[in-house]
Amino acid sequence: GQNIDQPTEMTATEGAIVQINCTYQTSGFNGLFWYQQHAGEAPTFLSYNVLDGLEEKGRFSSFLSRSKGYSYLLLKELQMKDSASYLCAVVNSNYQLIWGAGTKLIIKP
Amino acid sequence: IAGITQAPTSQILAAGRRMTLRCTQDMRHNAMYWYRQDLGLGLRLIHYSNTAGTTGKGEVPDGYSVSRANTDDFPLTLASAVPSQTSVYFCASSLSGSADTQYFGPGTRLTVL
């Protein structure tokens, strides 16, 4: 079967750094997406990794290790507006996205 | 403003009724998708279309049908709604049906009683 695992919930402090992990087992691999979803809203695109390594985009970075079936999203200088769910999704061999259940990130002042 | 629109925003429906959720995009994307999102579960693909005139089944297609008569519109129909179809439904589109970024509509919250 195909499986994406991420922690259900994480808590962090404003101004700090948090790392959200994602492990996957899918039929084939054609890339990995991270999306942000605020409560009651649609998911919005954050990052895409298809090669191993770190992709940096402002306060957000995403890392991929294909051999380990592992990715993480790193959020720096946390702000209250970063309180949201973060969704990991893998593109499988059929070019369909397989989604994790999401990690709810709670930011405390 | 370019993007994806969905209608209605929310709906309460009696079991057994027929319902069509509408989705329209103006980005000239070739591929469109319908997902459902339930608490504690990841987004699950219901149906997709890689180009106008073609459709395919996703992970959870039973009880749903779609059509893609043109590039912009991708309606989702529940022929005879059941309570297990209570969910939030998101429509999305991407430039092509490969690994392109998917852009999501605002969602429709559907309750079947």
Image (cartoon, rainbow, N blue to C red):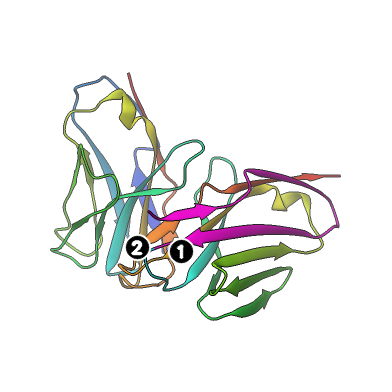
x, y (%) of residue A74?
Answer: 71, 64
Q: Is residue A6 above or below residue B112?
A: below
Q: Earlier in the sequence, mark 2 or mark 1?
A: 1
Q: Which residue type carries mark 2?
A: Gln
Q: Main secondary structure of the magenta part?
A: strand
x, y (%) of residue A105?
Answer: 69, 47
Q: Which residue is mark 2?
A: A96
Distance from the alpha carbon under mark 2 to that under mark 1: 8 Å
Which numbered circle lies on residue A90?
Answer: 1
Residue sitting at 53 percent across and 74 percent down? A66
Q: Quadrant of residue B76?
A: top left
Magenta-drawn segment: A1-26
Q: Is residue B52 above or below residue B82?
A: below
Q: Is residue A54 left or right of residue B95?
A: right
x, y (%) of residue A22?
Answer: 59, 59
Residue sitting at 52 percent across and 46 percent down? A101
Q: Is residue A78 left or right of residue B50?
A: right
Which one is nearer the viewer's eye here, A92 or B94? A92
